Each structure stands twice: as C-alpha cells, then as structure tokens.
Image: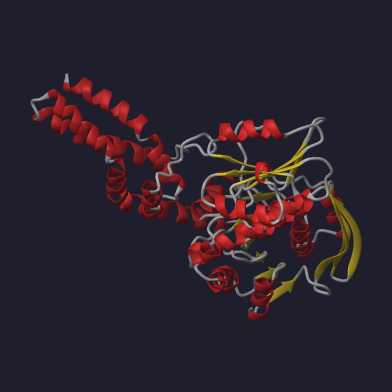
Amino acid sequence: MIYMLLCACAILYALFAYFFVKTYQLNGYNIGKFWGNCFALNFSIGDKNKLVFTKRIIRFYIVLTAFVCLLSALPMLFVGNGFLAAFDVCVVFVLTPVWITVVHYLILPLEILIKQYYIIKAKNKLGKKNIVKIGITGSYGKTSTKNILTHILEKQYKVCATPKNYNTEMGTTLTVLKHLDDHDVFIAEMGARKPRDIEKLTKNVNPDYAVITSIGNCHIETFKTLENIENTKFELAKFIKPEGVVFFGESDSTYKLFKRFDGNKVLTCRDKSFAYAENVTVNQYGCEFDLIIDQQQTHVKTKLLGKFNIDNIVVASAVAYKLGIKLEDIKMAIKTLEPSPHRLELIQNDYCSVLDDAYNSNEIGFKEALKVLSKFEGRKIVVTPGMVELGSKQSQINFALGCMIADECDYLIIMNEVNKNDLLSGAISHGMKRENIYFASTRAQQSELVKLLTCKGAVVLFENDLPDNYS
C-alpha cells in the first residue's frame, strides 16, 4: 500500500513541480534569481518557453522527486492519522522551492565535474583540428553578425557555427562535440552574464579571429556599469592568441576598445575605416548601400531591415574579405541574406504585415524597429513588454520608448507588469489616446487583442515578445 502511495506521490509531484523546475532552468540554474521569481510569484507558466529535458535537468528532476518522495514517506509511515499524513505531504509539496535549493547544492559538485569533462573534451577536439576559429561578442548584433558571416563564408568554406543564440560555455561545448566535423571554419558566439565569462569562452575556443560588435547598456542590471560591460567584452581581445586579429564594429564603446587594444586589429563601420557603408537607403523592404572594403567599393542590396543590420553586414564582410572571399562574392551573398528568425523579420500576407522582433532585447534595436515601422502605411500596432535588465535606467528608458511608440504607431499592447506604468506614461505624454493602449497578462489575451486591432493593411510589431500561437 505504501509503495503504491509513493508511486502516486512521485507522479503527482513530478507534475506539480514542473513549473518550479522550468523557472529554475530558465533562470540559468541560478538559485538567487529563482528565489527572486518565487517571491514575486513569477513562475514560468505557459508554452512560450518549455522545459528542456537535458541530461542535467533529467538528473535534477529524478533526484528532486526521489528526495520529496522520501520526505513524504515519513509522515505516511509514522503518522497514524491519515488526514495529518496528507496534510504533511501537502506541506512538503508547498515547500518545493526549498527542496529545489537543497537538491541544487546537493548535486552541484557532480554537475561541475560533468561540465568540466565535456569542456575539456571539446577543447581538445578543437585543438586537434586544422580549422579557422572565430569568436564573436558584443552587447548587440552577435547572433545576426554570426549568421551573416556564416552565409558569406559558405561561398567558399564549410562552416560550423553555434546555433541560434547558443553563446554560453556549454552551448559552445555541445556544438563542438555534436556538430563539428570536417569543417573549415568554426564560429562561436560568445555571451556574458558576468565578468570572466568571455575570458573562459576565449580560452576554450582559442580563436584566430575575433569580432566585437556594438556595446551598450544591455544587462546593465547584472554588470552595474557600462565600464564593466566594456571590460568583459574586451576579454575576447585580451585573451586571443598573440597572432590573432580583432575586428571592431560600431558604437562609441567599441571604438574605445579599438583604441585600447595593442594587437592586430581592424576598425569597421566608421567613415574611412577598413570597411564601412555610405549612400545608405532604407525602406520597409530592405536596405541598399555602397560597401567599401579596403578602399574597394561595390553597391549592395539586402532584404535585412534596419541600420544596425547594415553595421552587422559591414563587419561580417570585413572578416570574410580577410579570409579570402572576393568582394563580388560578398556582394552576391549579401543579396541572398535572409532575416534571422525573430530578429526584425518581415512576415507578410494578403491581409497584414508582421515585424517579428521578438528576440530583440536592447534599446538600440527597439528604436531601429520603430524606425522601420514608420516606413509602412496603414494601422500600426506595437506589442511589447518593454526592455528589462537596465538597472536604475530601466524606468527612464521605457518611458522614452513609450514616447517613441506614440510618435510612430496607433495602438500599443503592453505585455506583463514590469514596465507597464512607464510605457503607459510615456505613450500618453506624447499624445497617444488612453483608449488606444491595452494590457495583456496572458498569451491568450494578447492574441485576442491582436486579432481585435488588426485590420487589412495593418502592421504589427512584436518587440521583445511573440505569442506562441501567432501564425
């Protein structure tokens, strides 16, 4: 009887704990952030981000369930009153955040050992291959630059790049172990949540070429100051091999790092630098401009939207040129570029247009998306939760974004509570009518509002947020 009750308890608990475990995973297995969401009752309920059953999370889930079943067995065995035993089991279930914390620290040494084993294995595999290795970091444009560079280099090389926005130590490690084969070039996107993250990735990959894209106040809540962000991104240049070459993209902070670096370096995206764009024309269907590389010029066209994508194209083209791709081949590759999914991707049908910028999470990209939106005719709708992780400047920045939204669009749907008041106040201060501003706390509400407001010829911008059921 006890055995059947424990089996039932295990099944029930696995279902009950699902959203707690998903929140734990989505917070990067960071107990501090996990508890912050628990206190705020901000659990990851819904289908936008699913629990990914990696080997790590399976191990964690099994240990957690076994641990809770053991705790639940004690009242079943030693409390004679069935009601009290059931009450004790319920208390055990409610204390799930506590047990997640206990199990986290219980198996942490094992997880560290497993992680180091795979990192060393991937590092050794990379070291044995005669392959060109490229690292890309920055606050903005990492993934887009990686995708553009991959597309251009594929004209001549067999390229393996970290997929999607896999930019962590384990993301790079798994890419090397699972996907790297007889490739000529390996491209690693490198992200950071704290100082030394880029240093670790650089030492693991040991790149021949490095790219530092635009730098700004992204993740300022974590890094505290722009200087800390700059120093962390500079780790890619600091720890690259002595003969390695570093390419610097657009932004004042990036230019500051260019001047700071004493090694082999290439400046791009600035007038009269090694590679830059001029005579730029941008509309709702793409861009065209004159691309100048090493004092050679060609006129290029692309379906990619927004000025920031021109900067990404320029720096990627400069790297490709240094790797032997001819300017004419670069031009043809740029012409056939497709937007990265959810990064200012234009989706059109006979009824309306959608600007899907769901994966953007920075202020610069948000403003560029609004500029692209302004090029369209018809009713304009913005759906967004605003920008997060901006520290003390978050309120000010979201208020300013609300002002810009009011200047460029007709309707605003605000998703989630965090930036609700700032976006609302900013939009109203620039003349948007209160009745044209809506709030949605669930995906279903958001979807219904989009359907209600969308009309023939309308344009919907999903900024830093995309409903799962939109098609």
Quadrant showing the N terminus: top left
Is any atom of residue 197 visible in this view? no
Q: How many labels does the image show?
A: 0
Q: Where is residue 244 in the image (x, y as percent from the top left)?
A: 65, 70
Is any atom of residue 266 visible in this view? yes
Q: Nearer the viewer, residue 171 or 453?
A: 453
The quarter of the displayed image where residue 394 is located: bottom right
Task: Give above or below for 351 relative to 342.
Answer: above
| Left or right relative to 295: residue 198 | left
Q: Where is residue 428 in the image (x, y as percent from the top left)?
A: 66, 52
Residue at the extreme top of the image, as rendered: 1
Quadrant showing the C terminus: top right
Q: Position of residue 448 (x, y in %)?
A: 63, 30
| Left or right relative to 465: residue 271 | right
The quarter of the displayed image where residue 260 is located: bottom right
Q: In percent of the image, x 78 and y 37: which residue is there?
A: 458
